[in-house]
Image (tube, rainbow, N blue to C red):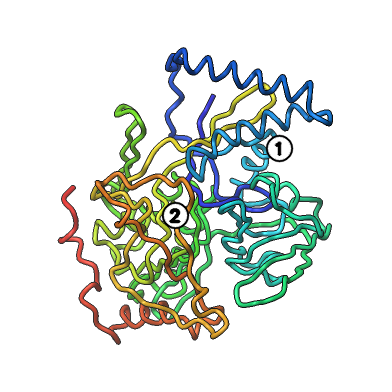
Amino acid sequence: MRKLSLLLVGTVLGAGLMLGVNNGAKMLSGTALAASPETYRQLMLFGDVLDRIRTDYVEQPDEDKLIEAAINGMLSSLDPHSSYLNPKGYKDMQLSTHGEFGGLGIEVTMEDNVLKVVTPIDDTPAARAGVRSGDIITQLDGESVQGLTLNQAVDKMRGPVNSEIKLTVKREGVADPIDIKITRATIQINPVKWHAEGEIGYLKIAQFNEHTYDRLKDAIQKADAEIGPDKIKGWVLDLRNNPGGLLDQAIQVSNAFLERGEIVSTRGRNADESQRYNARPGGDLTAGKPVIVLVNGGSASASEIVAGALQDHRRATILGTRSFGKGSVQTIIPIGPAGGALRLTTARYYTPSGRSIQAQGITPDIEVLQDPPPELKGKDSTTGEASLKGHLKNPNDATPADEKTGSQAYVPPDQKDDKALAYALDLLRGVKINAAFPANPKTAIPN
């Protein structure tokens, strides 16, 4: 049996895009803690309740659904990111790590029994149909989503390619519900896009799937060839609204800008489960040129690992708004003869300086706020990890007062209106001066 280590914020329709394989994950221990007598009594109580439902409920219940609901209830009581994947969900998750799946192209999460859009993925049916971050989905093809689990809602939104579905959404600032018709399609995700901004290379990572590092390497090589390696003044790495993905890809992407030192450590319940991941010498693909990393309230998980590593090593200047604050790692554990799996939170992760960003996020070295259009003012922020019911607390002696909620996540659709990107380009060109740029590796944490 192998474990799959994950970093995620939500679930992507058509498949769990923010999930994937980490081949370096430790195997499960062959030992288990013995259950207490009280636990056995509670299990007997569970069996008694199940039997009573099976025999006396007004209608014949679906026993498989009863068990699955009980398992999901148990896992959801732990934290917002632990859940059960039925065989279909597990298969979809495995397919999604390849960056190609069938669906709508939106990432959703469940907050207080409300199905909320985290973000539509660029160049997908959902994005083209006008779905927006923050939309609350109330109906699917005219049927209410109230009472559905996240997985059940996602299952309803999946379907054959070229089939149509109608989403009814509530949007802040709009009085009446909005009906959005979307035609399902095969979603092919290119995790990295790039272009030249004069003598500056712009790299945008949308998520961390199996192909992210390879696509990033290709993009850097193409930028070098187009601009000329001797002419490049620096790089902008855009991680805004990137909800995360594979742990091993976050490590490799960090190494693409680092020559040495720790990238991230993970610490589980037991001391022997701790792991440290270090950069490989010769890994920096950018020849030490200045780097600015753009983050915002939608940058989460694997994105925060990259930003935290480059910030702690003073390899990059972090610019934008505070990130989401998801500092935990999920492990996919195959379980049961039917082919299902547990998605279980098994560790917290820490940046090279030993800080946990759980429920706090990455604070940028330079804060730059966008100017949203009038209809979005006051509605352009994410609530963050700290607002999720049952979220893990920050272990670094943090108090609830240290938790951070709400951070701007708006990115203008037209690049000419993008204040954060413009500021980054001005810094790299020398038009603007800020004490936080360029980052100075000599002031980094000791390794």
Q: Indicate which disc residue 165 carries.
A: none
Q: In terms of image quadrants, where is residue 161?
A: bottom right
Q: To which residue does mark 1 refer? A: 88
The location of residue 165, given as percent across then percent down, is 80, 60
Q: Indicate which disc residue 385 carries.
A: 2
**Kind of residue indicated by mark 1:** Lys
User: In percent of the image, x 60 and y 57: which residue is there?
Assistant: 107
Secondary element at image label 2: helix
**On the rendered structure, is 353 left or right of 358?**
left
The location of residue 369, given as percent across then percent down, is 40, 78
The location of residue 245, given as percent across then percent down, is 50, 50
Relative to 392, does residue 57 appear above or below in the rendering? above
- The N terminus sits in image quarter: top right
Give the spatial CA distance, label 1 vs label 2: 28 Å
Q: Nearer the viewer, residue 285 or 57?
A: 57
User: In percent of the image, x 60 and y 31: which residue is there?
Assistant: 71
Q: In terms of image quadrants, where is residue 376?
A: bottom right
Secondary element at image label 1: helix
Which is in the foreground here, disc 1 or disc 2?
2
Whether the residues at callouts 1 and 2 have beta carbons within 8 Å, the answer is no
Count of picture labels: 2
| Earlier-in-chain disc, 1 versus 2 | 1
**Kind of residue indicated by mark 2:** Glu
User: In percent of the image, x 30 and y 57: which residue is there?
Assistant: 401
Q: Nearer the viewer, residue 170 or 12?
A: 170
User: In percent of the image, x 54 and y 47: which residue is there?
Assistant: 210
Q: Nearer the viewer, residue 73 or 166?
A: 73
